[in-house]
Amino acid sequence: MYWCKRYLATVIGLSALLYLASCKKDSSAAKDTMKFFDLKGYFESEAARLSKQNPDIDKTAIYNHQTEEQKVHIANWKSELSMFSESDINKPAWRLSYDVQSSEGFITYKAKDPALKTQDITIKKDGDKVRWILIINHTRSAIFTKTLSETVEKLSYFPDSLYHVQKKQYTRFLGINTYNVTGKFN
């Protein structure tokens, strides 16, 4: 009976060690999943950089032709740039979902499927330095052939210069709403 308990304890111990070893994150596998430009990583890096710099921002918000302007310090850059980072297309399921075109400092990703939220990303780079990023997002929900809601977003980012979010939203029962937010760096 003693050898049975000892054998069982050894088997459980080895099983636990093998399980823990299999949970180790493989960094090479993570790199292999990055087929496209790391938009999420780029904007997380920008958020950290801007949090340290704490620049003054001239922010203009327009909602259905009503304008509000103010000079602000952004307390949470990660949240401020979240619409940009949420447009990341580096998901394993989407590896074949985008056409990639590149020429003379431009990289463009175009969705093959109109049901994908992020339809277009264009990045202008000089070497490794990003000059600007333009993102087009589109979502639509419908029942049968009737559109219930549709949203088009155009996101523009120019490092240390300006960021701009244009959003047009149609809702069947509320009509059309437009939002424009521009942040200019001082």
Image: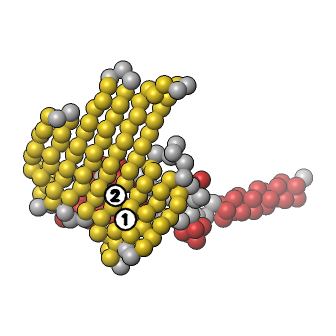
Q: Which mark is residue 105?
A: none
Q: Residue at x 21, y 33 (%)?
A: 64
Residue under label 1, please give it. 123
Residue 91 visible in the displayed image: no
Residue 90 on image: x %, y %:
50, 58
> Pointer 1: residues within 10 angstroms few (<14), some, or many (20+)?
some
What residue occupies the far bottom of the structure in this picture?
127
Q: Residue at x 47, y 67 (%)?
A: 101
Dots 1, 2 in contact, CB < 8 A: yes
**Image height of 137 relative to 28, above or below:** above
- Please name whichever residue, 64 or 74, is drawn nearer the observer in this view of the structure: 64
Residue 36 on image: x %, y %:
49, 64
Looking at numbered disc 2 in the image, what kind of residue is underneath it?
Leu
- 183 relative to 36 in the view: left or right: left
**Image height of 183 relative to 45, above or below:** above
Q: Residue at x 12, y 52 (%)?
A: 58
Q: Quadrant of the rendered structure where residue 125 is?
A: bottom left
Residue 46 on image: x %, y %:
30, 63
- Please name whichever residue, 66 or 41, is drawn nearer the observer in this view of the structure: 66
Residue under label 2, please give it. 134
- 72 relative to 79 in the view: left or right: left
Say what secondary structure mark 2 lies in.
Answer: strand
